[in-house]
Amino acid sequence: MLSREHLVCKIPVTHPRYASLMTRERIVEGVEKGITSLNGMIAQGRGEAFDYLIGERTIDDAMYATRAAVALLILAERPVISVNGNTAALMPEDMVKFSRKAGIPLEVNLFYRTEKRVRKIIGHLEEHGAVEVLGAEHNCMIPCLDHERAKTSSKGIFSADVVLVPLEDGDRCETLVKMGKKVICVDLNPISRTSRMATISIVDNVVRVIPNMSNLYDEMCGLSRPELEKLVESFDNQDNLKKTLLYIGKRMNELNIEGNFMDYS
Ligand code: PTJ
């Protein structure tokens, strides 16, 4: 049988889906290293399906949400970025770079939590330049949440005012909001509970979102407090999700009517 490494070498750079296939490889490698859960592969597949619907690019509505999210992060007093097994495998460099640039701590917080996986993810982020990663010590429990994501650090998610949660599950998102926190989620599925519950939902692939956030941060950290507040206050999550759904519907119609779907492989 061919080794997986051999199969990877067989994906030519010229393949029309090269970037997507290589992203998939990162998830597979994450599973092999013990960073990503097996379920992470299913989540990635679901994400890819939605990414197809938006054309595998950052649409205007997503950029608008990303801008509001960056404004919220700059205004926050105690922001935190929650890291799971998928994001750690997909783009550790970008997560660490953005965290360090914006001075926002990273906390490993897992749905399929094992202490071994938490330690591995922390080590992996440190290898990519993270100085301090929270999550090994989970001394506070999020109330009314029966799963492992309830385990948080008193220095991180538990006391945060703004939490950035890429690939979150809906009930924790809802609970964090009930606790009075502002939640920024990244989820390619615009109709997920997470997207509907979050304060700001970014319907885009996390591999594009974090670099976008990093660039916007450079551009926006010079804005005044009132300017940043205006960006946050004028953002309406439900309205933006509706626009995203309309965009997808329109795009599907156009592909269908013009027969262009044949070109989209
Ligand atoms: O590492 P753990 O144990 O914390 O587990 C992480 C996963 C992602 C496996 C866990 O949180 C999970 O099962 O998530 P769900 O409920 O499958 O939700 C994942 C959501 O993220 C889905 O709505 C996907 O569409 C979306 N998604 C998947 N990949 C991406 C994505 N959104 C943005 N970018 C992606 N690359």
Image: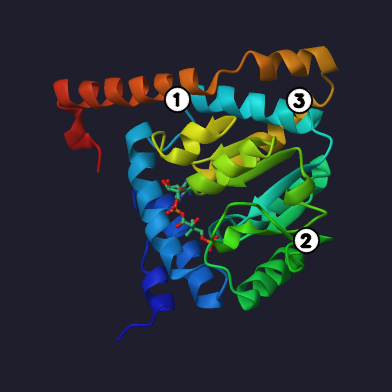
Q: Position of residue 155 (x, y in %)?
A: 83, 54
Contact? badges 3 and 2 (CB < 8 Å):
no
Q: Nearer the viewer, residue 16 or 80?
A: 80
Task: Please tell me whether residue 24 is drawn above or below residue 241 in the rendered image.
Answer: below
Q: Up-down: is 214 above or below 108?
A: above
Residue at 57% from the left image edge and 68% from the top image edge: 113
- The tag on residue 187 is none
Up-down relation of residue 180 to residue 16 (above or below): above
Disc 3/disc 1 C-alpha distance (Å): 25 Å
Identify residue for label 3. 219
Residue at 82 percent across and 40 percent down: it is 78
**Residue 133, label in figure:** 2
Q: Position of residue 89 (x, y in %)?
A: 57, 62
**Considering only order in the chain, which callout, 2 or 3, is on the residue closer to the N terminus?**
2
Q: Mark 2: which amino acid?
A: Val
Instruction: Note whether 22 is above or below 56 in the view shown.
Output: below
**Residue plotted at (84% across, 22% down):** 222
Q: Cβ(mark 2) to ligand 1 < 8 Å? A: no
